[in-house]
Amino acid sequence: MSVGSRRLARLLLLSLMAAGSSHASETQKCATSLVELRALLGAPGFAPTWEETTMGDGKPLVVSIGEKNGALLLVFTKSREGLWAESVGALCQTGADLEIRFGRQQIRIGPAAGWVVRQALGGGGTFTLTMLGAGCLKIATSGWDGIFVPVK
């Protein structure tokens, strides 16, 4: 590696370290209960259960957001097939979105999940939730996203 390349690599490494430390020092707003989630969203009527409208197989995912052991629990159930995935953690605000990051120990992949989902989420990942106006929620993760409406 040339001297110029090493300098560039060091500069990039220092820049990344500085960016990471400034990001880590920012106070992030997170929710670990439904009450906190509703306050974070400014939506006291935020529904705990949502149904997918964009599925191509006629079997929508239903996501239920509840609480378990001091954390939020997201349970994805594939209609007429069973558990797709469930994850626990905190939903944290990242710009206009909410994210729940999970490790291998925090997610359980169900029998209704296909091979691609198992590969994409089995080692951990992130679910991103984006409010799309009143009564519409986009949920996305690696290789998948869907639009959901509240279940009344």
Image (spheres, helix red, strand yellow):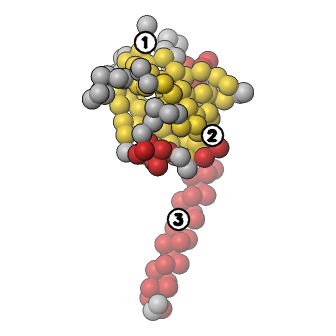
Number of residues whose C-alpha sits closer than 10 Å to that of mark 1, classed few (under 14), some (14–19) or many (20 or more): some
Q: Which residue is mark 3?
A: 16
Q: Which residue is mark 1?
A: 151
**Is residue 143 left or right of 125 when viewed as pictured?**
left
- Judging from the image, what secondary structure is the residue with disc 1 in? loop
Q: Position of residue 92 (x, y in %)?
A: 56, 36
Please state, as top left, top right, bottom left or bottom right, where the C terminus lies in the image: top left
Q: Position of residue 141 (x, y in %)?
A: 43, 41
| Separation of marks 1 and 3 at Cα, in angstroms | 43 Å
Kindly identify the residue that appears in the image at 49 percent across and 78 percent down: 9
- Nearest to N terminus: mark 3 or mark 2: 3
Q: Which residue is mark 2?
A: 106
* Residue 23 visible in image: yes
Give the amino acid type for the residue marked by disc 1 in the picture.
Val
Kindly identify the residue that appears in the image at 56 percent across and 42 percent down: 101
Kindly identify the residue that appears in the image at 61 percent across and 33 percent down: 88
Give the amino acid type for the residue marked by disc 3 in the picture.
Leu
